[in-house]
Amino acid sequence: MKKFINKLIILSLIALSASCSVDDVEPYYQLTPEDAIRDEASAQRILNGVYDLSREFDVSFFPLHLAAYGNEGRISGFLSGMNGMNNNTVKVQNPFLSNLYNGHYKIINSANFLIGKLEEGAAVGISDERKASMIAEAKTMRALVSFKLLRYFGEHYDLSSPYGIVLKTNFSTEIVSIPRSTVQESYDFILEDLDDAIANGPSNIPHFLVGKVTAQALKAKVLLYMNDYQGAASLADEVINNAEGYALETDYASIFTNTYNSPEVLFAPVHGSGSEGGTQMSQVKQTTYSETLRALSDAQVPGAGVVSSGADYDPRFAYAYSDMTKGNNANGKYPFISNAENENNTMYHLRLAEIYLIRAEALLRDPSGDDTEALSLLNEIRTRAGVAPSTTTDNAELLEEVRQEKLLELFFENGEPLFDLVRFSILGDINAADVKQSLDQEYKYIFPMPDQAVIGNTNLEQNPGY
């Protein structure tokens, strides 16, 4: 397979700086040549680098930590940054959080460089359409990463909170201490990027790239978090009924054997063998399922339930954890060994099944929403999984079934069940501590700002409770 991602962002990105800042200088490179971007080809190399940074070690297996911090599973072996994840006692000194924070701002800073250079006309000979398309891809990546940072480190569940994230719109090569924006300002920034990406993003692209449909899907998710249920439902409907071939797999296992080639995948980073690499999701072998997930999976199918054979469990759980399918990584969703000689794994940022369930939740929360359609959407996912359709008609019970269905569908993929747990608890549907005993105080709903971030940015305020 032709190598898509260039490990070097571009040859003109050189020498690490000695700065200790972790949100203003990333990716710690100085672009010395004035002609770093001079045409479409050199701009494409920078864009490739933006994608490539999303596969770096420090950012490419955090869903495993999120699974342990929430109700999907637990870390059972050794995983970098694991301290406090299983029991929700993460400390500000956790060095992995600093690397995670830094790694996400590297992506943002590289995207900012590309956007700035293209907007100032540095790429000679590129068409206006292609320039707008490349800017849209960079803005989608910037929005995705900003949304992740907001969910990890900001009070994303409270639009009136001052504890948003540090917003970066310009490429940086020196330390500038910038205070956090509010949560509302953070969301507004993300939405502005996504609106541009929806207007100008590419169509009919490989699923390891982000395009118009990816931006629509991400915006639907963001609007759900912002309690804009009509907006979320409307955009989710557009994504479900897209004209670009994105569609549910008929068989659940095919999502993970087809990886980013699956028609269901809206965005998953490229992976391959050897130097082309992939993500670190093979580290899933250091984790196992939670009792919450096991019991919920057991309840889907009549019988006693035998984990080793997968009998009497939800087929998705059985696919991941039965002896016949779990593979070397002890989770069938990540079948590849991931080393220099073998195929590597991807990770799943967005796929269509989640959008079905986003629309279902939005319809149920909207007073004018159609509960019957919400049930139908839920049952499309259940039917594909091979479990009996729900017959629930009570609105509150259906909402809880949607939350549980996302856990069954998305465990150990993108950390979404944790954020569902937080959102449902904040909205009063459940008590998070009843699901995860150690998630017993609201300040634990997000992670602390890493101590190195606070040291490097003197205007950065720590999260309450830490």
Image (tube, rainbow, N blue to C red):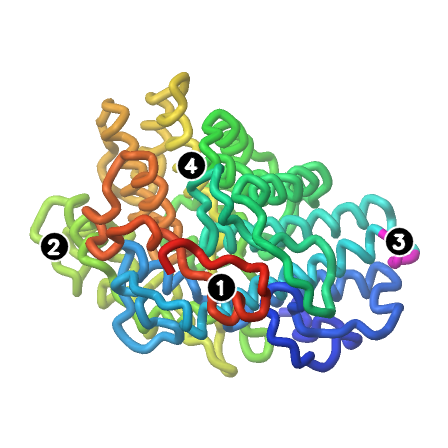
> What is the crowding at mark 2: few (fewer than 14 residues within 10 Å), some, or many (at least 20)?
some
Determine which residue is flagged by label 1: 346
Q: CA distance from mark 1 to mark 3?
A: 34 Å
On the picture, is 219 further left or further right than 39? left
Judging depth in this view, the residue of 352 and 448 nearest the camera is: 448
Q: Looking at the image, is mark 3 or mark 2 nearer the viewer?
A: 3
Determine which residue is flagged by label 4: 358
Q: CA distance from mark 4 to mark 2?
A: 30 Å
Q: Are circles 1 and 3 on residues that touch, CB within 8 Å?
A: no
> Seen from this angle, which residue lies furthest top?
368
Q: CA distance from mark 1 to mark 2?
A: 30 Å
Which amino acid, by three-letter code, is at mark 4?
Ile
Label 1 vs 2, first from the N-terminus: 2
Magenta stretch: give its range. Answer: 120-124
The disc placed on residue 188 is: none
Locate residue 116: give its quadrant: bottom right
> What is the crowding at mark 1: few (fewer than 14 residues within 10 Å), some, or many (at least 20)?
many
Residue at (40%, 26%) from the top-left corner? 363
Which amino acid, by three-letter code, is at mark 3?
Gly
The disc placed on residue 121 is: 3
Q: CA distance from mark 4 to mark 1?
A: 23 Å
Label 4 vs 2, first from the N-terminus: 2
Determine which residue is flagged by label 2: 305
Q: Position of residue 386 (x, y in %)?
A: 27, 43
Q: Looking at the image, is mark 1 or mark 3 nearer the viewer?
A: 3
On the picture, is 276 further left or further right than 415? right
